[in-house]
């Protein structure tokens, strides 16, 4: 157990979890019945097996989602700060997206040919994210797979470099980890028959010396990076790290892809636009079409030249890049609605002060209860980290994790009508979030931390 975890009273956490799981079962008999029915035909009783990773006795079945409000099968309502783990980052069924879906439904959903929205969306993507050339995929996983393939083709190199604890969707090449400093396939990787480390290098985030040593060999086609690590707990880049990353990749002829699927919370141009990064490739999925499955990847003029040179000389045949439903009329209609109406500087400028208020509130509550934790915020995204200090890399972030306490936090909140992400307790503020919603979240967190710390709540309205 890490030092930070041992400082939390485990007996209080265990008692809290036991009580909250019982309360969940008492509140949600309809969900329990549905779980029994779905178990007959679905793996783990759900359409996608991650849906059971909430630490609840059985899944919560959601009957309706609108704006930031969820309604479960038992009729309970919740304020949603998970927002589909950024898939619904701009709220559930934003009016502009819902209108676009209705309009496009009468015009056809997919034809394997471009729709008139393609020209408009291309211009909007270039204006918003700075890169001139784009493609559409069904998911960010598909986008990252495509970028890896194009980078290898463009450079003639085999190797991919990623960071320990990274998350780039379901891309096989990225499922590597460091164990006692040695690379290996990520534990738990299902059905992988090859040694992924044969073509993927894994190093720690923020380690400039390791980065240069890996790139110096001259065989790395691509560095695939989150600008802030987000799936092992929040790991912020050290001052100057992104400058070093860009300088070293250019120096050694390696292409750089920034995966913004989670860090689009930073601003309308993502972390890339907010902090002036200059990637060769850019990936974003989940929220780009307001909840309809879609993702985009873009690349620079220089990379475009490399790709075109490669395409002139390659053998004829199927590229292995792209799927039939990618670039559909429905995806483009929804992306246009998001880019024109939601993914804008004005929308972010209105929502960011509320995210800052949330960050300050959580920090105050943690300090009041004397817990060895802290809060990290990247734009509209906040997260409670189970350590007193910022982790410097994926190894530290994973050591700091205290899953029982984290489960207790989100389950306590869930039973009081507030949804936060169960994976390391991430919270999103969206354009439709209001001050009373944040106050309700802070009340719930204060109540949960009071149970864990044994101290009285800070906020008079905390619910027990």
Image (cartoon, helix red, strand yellow):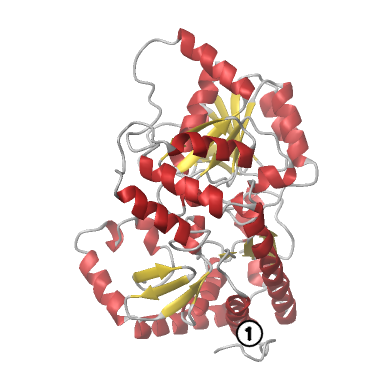
Towards the viewer: 129 or 223: 129
Residue 234 lies, in percent from the top left, at 64, 56
Q: Which quadrant: the N terminus?
A: bottom right
> Which of the 4 quarters of the picture holds residue 436?
bottom right
Towards the viewer: 328 or 168: 328
119 lies above or below 37: above
Q: Is residue 137 left or right of residue 156?
A: left
Residue topped by disc 1: 450
Q: Is residue 349 left or right of residue 160?
A: right
Residue 192 lies, in percent from the top left, at 38, 37
Q: Secondary structure at mark 1?
A: helix
The answer to whether residue 141 is visible is yes
Farthest right residue in view? 239
Farthest top residue in view? 313
Towards the viewer: 52 or 190: 52
Q: Which residue is depicted at the point 60% across and 43% down? A: 164
Towards the viewer: 11 or 267: 267
Residue 159 lies, in percent from the top left, at 56, 25
Q: Which quadrant: the C terminus?
A: bottom right
Q: Which residue is depicted at the point 41% across and 44% down? A: 331
Instruction: Please give the count of numbered marks on the rendered protein.
Output: 1
364 lies above or below 286: below
Residue 426 lies, in percent from the top left, at 57, 63
């Amino acid at each position: 157990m890490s030092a930070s975890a041992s400082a939390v009273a485990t007996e209080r956490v265990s008692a809290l979890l036991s009580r909250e799981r019982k309360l969940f079962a008492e509140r949600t008999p309809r969900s329990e019945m549905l779980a029994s029915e779905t178990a007959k035909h679905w793996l783990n009783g759900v359409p996608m097996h991650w849906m059971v990773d909430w630490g609840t006795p059985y899944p919560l079945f959601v009957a309706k989602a609108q704006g930031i409000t969820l309604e479960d099968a038992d009729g309970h309502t919740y304020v949603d700060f998970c927002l589909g783990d950024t898939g619904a980052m701009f709220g559930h069924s934003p009016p502009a997206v819902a209108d676009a879906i209705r309009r496009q439904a009468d015009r056809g959903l997919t034809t394997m040919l471009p729709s008139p929205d393609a020209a408009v969306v291309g211009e909007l993507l270039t204006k918003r994210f700075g890169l001139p050339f784009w493609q559409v995929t069904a998911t960010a996983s598909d986008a990252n797979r495509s970028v890896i393939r194009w980078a290898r083709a463009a450079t003639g190199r085999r190797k991919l470099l990623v960071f320990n604890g990274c998350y780039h969707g379901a891309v096989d090449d990225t499922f590597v980890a460091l164990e006692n400093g040695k690379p290996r396939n990520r534990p738990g990787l299902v059905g992988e028959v090859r040694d992924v480390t044969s073509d993927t290098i894994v190093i720690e985030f923020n380690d400039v010396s390791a980065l240069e040593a890996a790139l110096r060999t001259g065989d790395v086609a691509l560095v695939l990076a989150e600008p802030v690590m987000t799936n092992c707990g929040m790991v912020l880049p050290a001052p100057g790290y992104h400058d070093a990353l860009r300088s070293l990749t250019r120096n050694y002829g390696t292409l750089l892809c920034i995966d913004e699927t989670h860090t689009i919370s930073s601003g309308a141009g993502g972390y890339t636009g907010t902090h002036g990064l200059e990637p060769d490739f850019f990936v974003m999925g989940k929220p780009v079409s307001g909840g309809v499955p879609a993702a985009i990847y873009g690349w620079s003029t220089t990379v475009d030249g490399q790709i075109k040179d490669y395409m002139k000389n390659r053998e004829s045949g199927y590229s292995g890049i792209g799927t039939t439903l990618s670039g559909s009329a429905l995806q483009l209609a929804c992306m246009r609605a998001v880019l024109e109406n939601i993914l804008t500087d004005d929308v972010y400028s209105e929502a960011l002060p509320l995210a800052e208020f949330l960050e300050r509130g959580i920090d105050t509550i943690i300090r009041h209860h004397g817990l060895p934790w802290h809060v990290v915020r990247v734009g509209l995204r906040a997260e409670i980290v189970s350590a007193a200090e910022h982790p410097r890399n994926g190894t530290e972030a994973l050591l700091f994790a205290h899953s029982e306490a984290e489960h207790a936090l989100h389950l306590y909140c869930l039973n009081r009508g507030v949804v936060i992400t169960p994976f390391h307790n991430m919270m999103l503020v969206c354009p439709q979030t209001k001050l009373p919603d944040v106050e309700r979240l802070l009340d719930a967190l204060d109540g949960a931390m009071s149970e864990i710390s044994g101290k009285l709540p800070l906020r008079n309205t905390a619910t027990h």
